[in-house]
Amino acid sequence: MINFITWIVAGALIGWAASIIMRTNNRQGLISDILVGIVGAFMGGYFLSPLFNVGTINDGDFSMPALLVSLGGAILVLLLTKLFRNVLGYLVFIIVAVGIYVYFDCWTVASTSTFCAGVRALPFLQ
């Protein structure tokens, strides 16, 4: 129970710090700060932890590098929410996500599916 409370407090502090850095503090309240901090720690763990070889607060690691990775993830969450505020940003995100999926599914795994064969046959990808 005490770990859960510590997790919420650390998430709130990280979300608050990220909202100050991204200048969204006037629009956010305590619940948004907590959500940004916790989701940011998950995203930091997924994207930034392999780069820096550091855990996050979600792993129970409350060291300074782990807090900085979680803060980086929270800033990434706020950047994505700014991107999703307009339709064009949403479309760009979808196109990039599909491109990443096709790259990892068709080229690195060397899939033999008909979809990947069709993608490899596109003239502008050769």
Image (cartoon, rainbow, N blue to C red):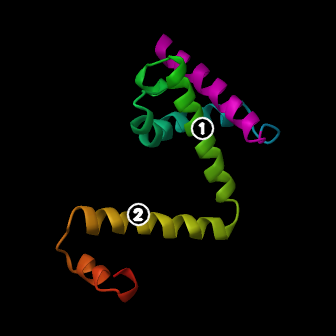
Q: Residue furthest left?
A: 112
Q: Residue flagged by tag 1: what amino acid is it?
A: Ala
Residue 100's label in the rendered image is 2
Residue 94 position, x and y percent, is: 51, 67
Q: Residue at x 43, y 38 (%)?
A: 51
Residue at image coords 70%, 65%: 86
Residue carrying label 1: 74
* Front residue of 72 and 53: 53
What crowding class fits label 2: few (fewer than 14 Cα within 10 Å), some (14-19), or many (20 or more)? Answer: few
Q: Which residues are magenta?
A: 1-24
Please name the amino acid that badge 2 sits on. Answer: Ile
Extreme residue toward the top, this view? 2
**Residue 66 % position (x, y):** 50, 24
Numbered disc in front, either 1 or 2:
2
Tag 1 secondary structure: helix
Up/down of 113 relative to 121, above or below: above
User: Which of the 4 image quadrants contains residue 50?
Assistant: top left
